[in-house]
Image: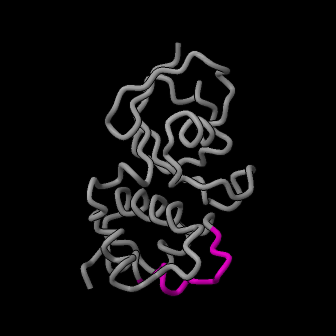
Amino acid sequence: MIKVKVNGEERSWDGDPSLPLLWFLRDELGLVGTKFGCGQALCGACTVHVAGTAARSCITAVSDVDGQEVVTIEGLHPQGDHPVQKAWRELNVPQCGFCQAGQIMQAASLLAETKNPSDDEIRGGMAGNICRCGCYQRIEAAVRVAATGT
């Protein structure tokens, strides 16, 4: 039996331990904010936090998170008021919005590790997350706002 804390709630899984975490979150728990993009950890749409660090849930097996804490976009802040989420809204970052949950989770992880990142650190920290609409300048600006409040 695999036990994992998801968004603060203890969960158990006695199914296939190799099931990708993405499908456990979406299909078993109904947490559909985490998106399927490429299935190969190349786009970042499926980014969640595992033990406080950004992880690609499409290639992370449920067994890999046994005994750990997972946070999805639904659990980042109960009212959606994490500083990154607030900055995203303030700067109207999304265009289509498909990649935004993964972008926000990656940015939140980056800012947890680097409190006031330089522009190069923001670009490097966000490089693995693809935005099909090309909203990279707004994404970088929102990360900056979330980090500094300006």
First to last magenta residue range: 130-141
Q: In this orientation, which residue lies closer to the viewer: 89 or 114? A: 89
Query: Residue drawn 38% across and 86% down?
Result: 91
Residue 71, image x, y percentages: 41, 44
Q: Is residue 75 magenta?
A: no
In the image, taking residue 80 as reference, residue 74 lies left or right, namely right
Q: State whether residue 34 is above or below residue 68.
A: below
Task: Give the residue furthest to the top.
Answer: 1
Along the viewing direction, whichever of 139 and 89 lies nearer the viewer: 89
Q: Camera-side residue: 131 or 114?
A: 131
Q: Residue at x 53, y 21 (%)?
A: 13
Note whether 74 is above or below 116 in the view shown.
above
Q: Is residue 139 above or below residue 44?
A: below
Q: Is residue 61 above or below residue 34?
A: above
Residue 140 part of the magenta segment: yes
Q: In this orientation, which residue lies closer to the viewer: 4 or 129?
A: 4
Which colour assignment does the render follow?
one colour
Q: Position of residue 40 (x, y in %)?
A: 75, 50
Question: Measured from the top left, where is residue 53 in percent x and y?
Answer: 45, 47
